[in-house]
Image (cartoon, helix red, strand yellow):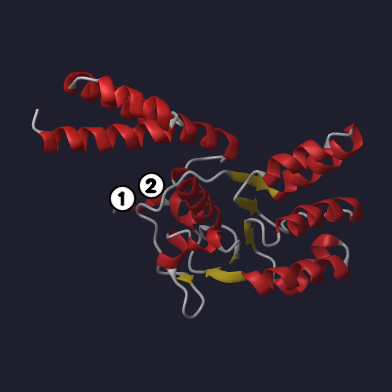
Amino acid sequence: MQRSEREATEEAFRAAARALFISGETIDGFVASATPGQLSACRSMLEAELVHRDRAKRQRLLRQARFPVPKSFDGFDWSNVSFPDGWGREDMLSLSFMERAEDLVFYGPTGRGKTHVATAVGMAAVSAGHPVRFWQTAQLVPRLGKAKREGTLDRLLADVAKARLLVLDEFGYVPFDVDGARLLYQVISESYERRSVIFTTNVESGRWGTVFADDKLAAAIVDRVARHGRLVEFGGPSHRLEESLMLGKSGR
């Protein structure tokens, strides 16, 4: 083996070993005594282990996210999706909003693809190695109430706190009582400037008071989202209706 080849192999070996948290002293000792073949074989083994761990991590993150149905951006029709001025689809797909713990509000009528895109963004975040939690809001609120009654609220909130991205799907589709609204407010408030939240909703922010049964709570949340959030509007025909009518588009 040429020296240059050994140097390249050694560099790759050291990088893989450091990624697996093997001490520098152990690495140096092995490199000093290893034959070229041993160095190459160990490098391959360590790199294979890194690939395995990375794959296992993403599978674990995917399970923990609890997406109802896997979704991707492939084939999605963006023609009826409106982004804010100066901020567009590529900005969203880059996940740069998560670096600044910014929120996104996906607003529009039912069946326009809000949940589809929110899920796809969440899955992209998982692929990038970020923990995500996906909740239908109507399921999260009673779950919070049950956890509070059973004395396990801290555990549930700690699980949410692990996420870099929280998706609250169908926000406002079902109104909450005051206790449920306060618990949901706690989740959203504790996420402020700590993690990004994606809301999918068909309720204008001006009517969020009807959802929370408390105008002050709603105003506080709207204020937080307005400071660190962006509105993405979904219009056009219903994707669900179009899909249900696909059999009728066979050119009879």
Q: Amino acid at mark 2?
A: Leu
At x 25% / y 33%, what residue is drawn? 10
At x 84% / y 51%, what residue is drawn? 183
Q: Which mark is residue 250?
A: 1
Marks 2 and 1 in Cβ contact (< 8 Å): yes
Judging depth in this view, the residue of 54 and 72 nearest the camera is 54
Q: Amino acid at mark 1?
A: Ser
Judging depth in this view, the residue of 77 and 46 nearest the camera is 46
Image quarter (top left, top right, bottom left or bottom right) of the N terminus: top left
Q: Is residue 12 left or right of residue 149?
A: left
At x 76% / y 66%, what residue is drawn? 221
Is residue 128 at least partly visible in the picture? yes
Judging depth in this view, the residue of 157 and 104 nearest the camera is 157
Mark 2: secondary structure? helix
The percent coordinates of residue 47 (x first, y second) are: 32, 30
Residue 91, quarter of the rendered image: bottom left
Q: Badge 1, how many Cα within 10 Å: few under 14, some, many 20+?
A: few
What residue is disc 2 on? 247
